[in-house]
Image (cartoon, rainbow, N blue to C red):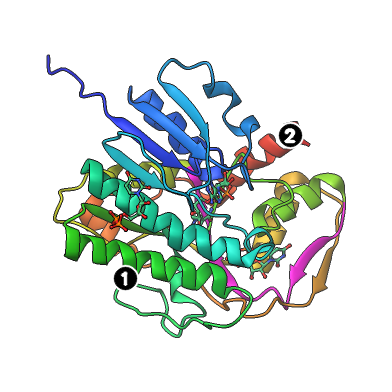
Amino acid sequence: MAKLQVKKLLVTGGAGFLGSHLCERLLAADHDVLCVDNFFTGGKANIEHLLKHPRFELMRHDITFPLYVEVDEIYNLACPASPVHYQFDPVQTTKTSVHGAINMLGLAKRVKARILQASTSEVYGDPEIHPQSEGYWGRVNPVGPRSCYDEGKRCAETLFFDYWRQHSVRIKVARIFNTYGPRMHPNDGRVVSNFIVQALRGEDITVYGDGRQTRSFCYVDDLVEALIQLMDTADDFTGPINIGNPREFTILELAEEVMRLTGTNSKIVFRPLPADDPRQRQPDIALAESKLGWRPTTELAQGLERTIRYFQQAL
Ligand code: NAD
Ligand code: UDP
Ligand code: UDP
């Protein structure tokens, strides 16, 4: 029987929502996992169940500073992802994306590691084409409140492609669309966690704008599966590649679904739409389907039910 090759993997942002699920899956595949996090939005509670695992190691570290470790692959997820959190200290957000990418790429170059970047659908901004495919260059405001995140992530992509062209670093760029699931921060302000927490507490459900803007929601397990498959693609495949669930919903439809599944008595209230809030978002995942043979399998109702169960216990 072929011996499993144990890889040493670095997950930055590993104590966050997506990172903690990724660490769990990589450990289950028998790899060594080094989780690096500064605990800005993530926390030990997300990885508490992994701390005793013999192949798991946790390091408190901010990736805007250099990091010298020996690893085979790097999943670079460190960065606050919710608008409330990334706008809290926007300069630090840009530093995390840009200085963080430089440091992690410098590390990948030195140890000849593969490196995967958790990029985002925000690189498309408020898009004029629908659904969004990887060839689209986006429509992003460079000077607005979302720019620290959007432009930071765009610059990180630029750095990844220049380290690939200039230094032959083996890169993978994933453009992640809205993803939800257990371990989202209850106060991070993202729509799925907000609606579920509001519904469970019997508070008003806050729909921003008229609620007709759209998003396409991917369950975390589907997303993590795609990231691992992407890392395992041949060296000549760099992406960028969209990872998300193409099923599109209006925010009002999401609110109604959460209300139905929780059986809440909460009422919908309308609040002002935040600046530069994209009107529509839906991934074209043809590339992921052909390159990875991947497509998400979790329906919204199913994923929401699991997430609701998590918040029922967490609150
Ligand atoms: P999250 O906020 O739960 O996790 C981010 C983690 O990074 C946290 O644990 C935080 O403490 C850590 N972190 C932040 N700055 C850091 C720094 N300078 N050094 C070290 N650690 C740092 O968010 P998430 O939803 O898990 O997102 C993970 C990644 O995926 C992010 O890069 C995000 O941009 C990307 N992404 C997420 C989504 C989504 O819908 N969840 C969509 C697109 C892209
Ligand atoms: N770096 C790091 N870990 C390493 C190697 C490099 O954090 O193992 C950082 C280093 O601090 C540098 C950055 O990555 O600032 C970019 O490295 P690179 O070798 O590309 O550039 P240079 O060192 O020439 O500036
Ligand atoms: N949103 C909302 N109510 C909330 C939180 C968010 O209507 O309590 C809206 C928000 O304006 C946006 C969508 O839901 O149109 C998704 O917001 P989120 O912050 O989750 O992610 P992003 O805007 O980055 O896609």
Give neighbour class at mark 2: few <14, some 14-19, many 20+ (Cα, 10 Å).
Answer: few
Q: Is residue 122 visible?
A: no
| SS state under label 1 | loop
Q: Are marks 1 and 2 in contact (CB under 8 Å)?
A: no
Is 238 displayed left or right of 146 in the figure? Answer: left
Where is residue 20 shown, x and y percent of the image?
52, 36
**Disc number placed over residue 160 in the picture, else none:** none
Write down the residue under mark 1.
134
Write down the residue under mark 2.
314
Q: Is residue 91 above or below residue 226?
A: below
Q: Is residue 14 visible?
A: yes
Where is residue 9 shown, x and y percent of the image?
34, 34
Range of residues picked out in magenta: 203-220
Q: CA distance from mark 1 to mark 2?
A: 37 Å
Q: Does the Cβ of the disc 2 residue fall within 8 Å of ligand 1?
A: no
| SS state under label 2 | helix
Where is residue 14 shown, x and y percent of the image?
50, 39
Where is residue 160 shown, x and y percent of the image?
30, 61
Residue plotted at (63% across, 37% down)? 43
